Image (cartoon, rainbow, N blue to C red):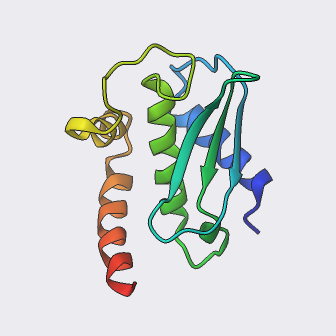
């Protein structure tokens, strides 16, 4: 069953395999949020305790959604963290998505197949809405 504990485990697995060069400078919490049609994940810095909160679409608790989509969403949010958005790391860009920086970094980290899977899946997913 996919729950917040499973998400934490997945985050740690992805971090260890693909983001081990990025230091965890603060506490990172990941959990399922509310169900949404279009927003798959988000990352926020909690200014009161300086922790980072990653929320994943609550729909993704359902195993009908491929694990690759969850992995892509987690990795996407970790790229934001690494690039200084909602984290103590220095910002590497002015805007978090401009110029395809997310997909470029995911590809550099060996996650190019995940990007291709995601793009194909999203196209099919949007057709079902």
The residue at 38%/77% (across/down) is 125
User: Which sits in the foreground, 121 or 94?
Assistant: 94
Picture layout, residue 79 above or below residue 56: above
Q: For the N terminus, which image quadrant?
A: bottom right
Task: In the displayed orientation, state which residue is furthest to the front.
Answer: 48
Q: For the C terminus, which image quadrant?
A: bottom left
Q: In which quarter of the view is residue 120 placed?
A: bottom left
User: How far across and how far down the image is residue 58, in percent?
Assistant: 65, 65
Task: In the displayed orientation, state which residue is furthest to the top.
Answer: 90
The residue at 51%/19% (across/down) is 21
Judge from the rendering whether residue 86 lies leftward or rightward of residue 90; answer left or right: right
Picture layout, residue 23 above or below residue 78: above
Task: In the displayed orientation, state which residue is furthest to the bottom.
Answer: 128
User: How far across and how far down the image is residue 23, in percent?
Assistant: 59, 17
User: How far across and how far down the image is residue 96, in percent?
Assistant: 35, 34
Judge from the rendering whether residue 47 lies leftward or rightward of residue 17; answer left or right: right
The residue at 64%/16% (across/down) is 25
Picture layout, residue 94 above or below residue 62: above
Task: In the displayed orientation, state which residue is furthest to the left.
Answer: 99
Judge from the rendering whether residue 111 lies leftward or rightward of residue 67; answer left or right: left
Q: In which quarter of the view is residue 106 placed?
A: top left
User: Which sits in the foreground, 73 or 94?
Assistant: 94
User: How far across and how far down the image is residue 70, in percent?
Assistant: 54, 58
**Count of residue discs:** 0
The residue at 55%/25% (across/down) is 20
Judge from the rendering whether residue 45 lies leftward or rightward of residue 9; answer left or right: left
Picture layout, residue 81 above or below residue 75: above
């Amino acid at each position: 069953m996919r729950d917040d504990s499973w998400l934490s485990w997945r985050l740690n697995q992805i971090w260890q395999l693909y983001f081990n060069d990025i230091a965890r400078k603060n506490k990172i919490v990941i959990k399922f949020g509310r169900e949404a049609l279009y927003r798959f994940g988000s990352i926020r810095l909690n200014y009161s305790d300086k922790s980072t909160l990653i929320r994943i679409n609550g729909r993704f608790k359902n195993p009908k959604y491929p694990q690759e989509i969850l992995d892509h969403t987690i990795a996407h949010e970790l790229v934001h963290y690494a690039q200084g958005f909602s984290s103590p790391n220095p910002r590497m860009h002015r805007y978090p998505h401009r110029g395809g920086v997310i997909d470029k970094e995911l590809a550099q980290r060996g996650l190019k197949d995940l990007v291709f899977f995601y793009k194909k899946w999203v196209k099919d997913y949007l057709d079902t809405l």
